[in-house]
Amino acid sequence: MLRALMIGVLLFGGVSEVGAQKKSPAGVVKKKPSAKPNEIKSKLPAAFNSTPNINQPVKPVRIDQASKVLESAARIDGLVEAKLKAEGIQPNPEIDDARFVRRAYLDITGEIPTGRDAYLFVRSNLANKRGVLIDYLLNSVGYSSHMFNYWADTWRIVDKSTNNTYIRPWADWVKQSLRQNKPYDVMVRQMLVADGQIFDNPAVGYRLRDVGMPLDHLNNTVRVFLGTRIGCAQCHDHPFDKWTQKEFYQLAAFEGGMQTQLPRKEYAQSNLKKYMEEVGERSPEANRMRLIERWNRYGVMETSTNLKYPHDYAYDDAKPNQVVLPEILFGKKPALPENASRRQIYAHWMTSRQNPRFTRTIVNRLWKHAFGIGLFEPVDDMTDYTKASNPELETFLISEMKRLNYDMKEFLRIVYNTKSYQRSVTYDDVDLAKPYHFPGPVLRRMTAEQVWDSVLVLTVNNTEKYLRPNDNPFLAAVNTEPGLNLDEIKAKVAAYTAADKAKRDHNRRHTYRGLVLRRASELPQPLPAGHFLRQFGQSDREIIGDGSTEGTVPQLLALFNGPITHIMLEAGSVVHREVMGARESDRLTVVFLSILGRMPTAEERAACFKEIQENQAAGMGNVIWALLNTREFLFVQ
């Protein structure tokens, strides 16, 4: 009863305020403000009462490729269906429009559609409305936001890789690159060859992510971009693959001259000690200036230093402490000018279309992104013996990726337009040890980011308009030339303090019950351990692709009675406004469309009406809360 009463009060304001108001003094007549029709006073932060005037340009899909998209999609369907027939497997049935619109929104933008958008799509008579919707979603900021979450988990994107390295500009650069639809090979190559400091070249954040760990960085790079694990060969010949320790060091030698900690003498603040004597060594001002100095001592610089084999190298194909000559793992070195650096050779070999594992890896990753399972699994443990479940399909997809010049958006556009993608999910458990032949996508629980962003859809209008604080004033304050005098140091600290305060004020305007209400891509990377996103499986970004979709008890408690429930039921939320703005007979339909993207069945309608009749306003709140806690809400079907 207490919970029912609480939800009723939250959602529909079922308690009169008249008794709580103080009586007016005798003889004073208070004029009541004229009520606006259907006006709902929002209890959400004031910042959400109006939409920010923010425009983030997004490069659209290519209109001139529409017919080619359908042609390639049909080719994919033919290859999938041929394999299914050969294996004696029936394809899953095609999904209806209600299920498609929800799946498309979740897979492309990482959030559910609003009830209104779901309804309008289902009722539309447009013949090619699915293709139109796919293009519309790919052209939205939501696409880049959702893809950022994927790459943030894969590339382990963080705001700070250590207390000495501030690399948030890298995250902003990745988001901008996705909005620009930068070709994948170009994007990767820019990260591999980037040098300088984070203030001037944000792509250096990729290397600064593993600052001080060059061999681990190599292992991560090969695993992420070539789908291959060579880490064991760092210490000894690989026990389960062909890679030797010598080969590992030969590849690492291409980057043997890379430094991430810049020379202290050149980047230190010679007057820092005098400043600390003036303000106190343990003062906030001294701590801020120490931090500024440390952040400016990290960057990426290539030197002529050579890598050497370890002192305890135990094999007879090289000697301990011997200089390592760089050599690629397989394939041919790219044709580059004679003055090309070792790192340029390495980066161009890594991202070359002649490098078989580079294209194969991104194709498999994007296919899994759409279908929930790759052509081979795991996606990052390829060997010479790794075989795709459908080799002919894989060959065609690789040729398409090359034809598209590594345009990820156009590649996914083709995949989403296939009949294979638009079939019902496979509900049975999938054995990853056996080939999966794609009678349809596999059933998946939403990622942590999809759950969070979907709840925001039920809470805040125009979620893509609410962004992280602009980092430029903060970067300008932190970016410092060495050798500042005392007055310049004081000015820097003051600028840092003001910029940091502005960021905190910006966040405070978006905060409700301790939670900042912005899309997951617009929150700190990653969130602290107790945050809703972490409870639902967002990784701590220490391990590649470590996000989880496993269910836990804290997740149940978070949805059962956590702040997130209060946020969605609060007066002024999207679902509250749409329910209250509908006719009483339509309110249940609005609730189902908003949360599950479909109409209620006759049985569900009867059960919900009974609950509403028995508990009135609180009953509607209970229905909303119950739907949010269903597997149907949490799973991508």
Image (cartoon, rainbow, N blue to C red):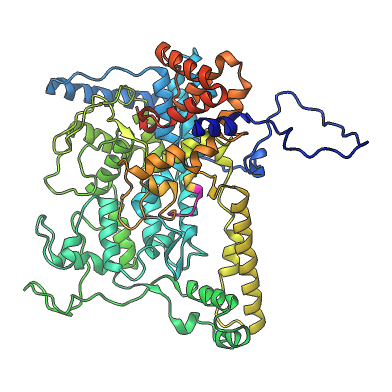
Majority SS type along the magenta span:
loop
| Nearer-the-camera pick, 633 or 22 | 22
Which residue is rendered at x = 44% and y = 50% of the image? 531
Asked if residue 131 is among those painted magenta in the image, a careful observer would answer no
Residue 401 versus residue 311 in the image, above or below = above
Instruction: State the residue lying farthest toward the right.
Output: 27
Residue 590 x/y as whole percent? 53, 21
Which residue is rendered at x = 36% and y = 75% of the image? 303
| Nearer-the-camera pick, 601 or 475 | 601
From the viewer's perspective, is 165 left or right of 12?
left
From the viewer's perspective, is 388 left or right of 572?
left
Residue 119 versus residue 145 in the image, above or below = above
From the viewer's perspective, is 328 left or right of 572?
left
Residue 608 versus residue 292 in the image, above or below = above
Asked if residue 525 is among those painted magenta in the image, a careful observer would answer yes
Q: What stretch is highlighted in magenta?
A: 522-526
Q: How many marks overall?
A: 0
Residue 291 x/y as whole percent? 51, 73
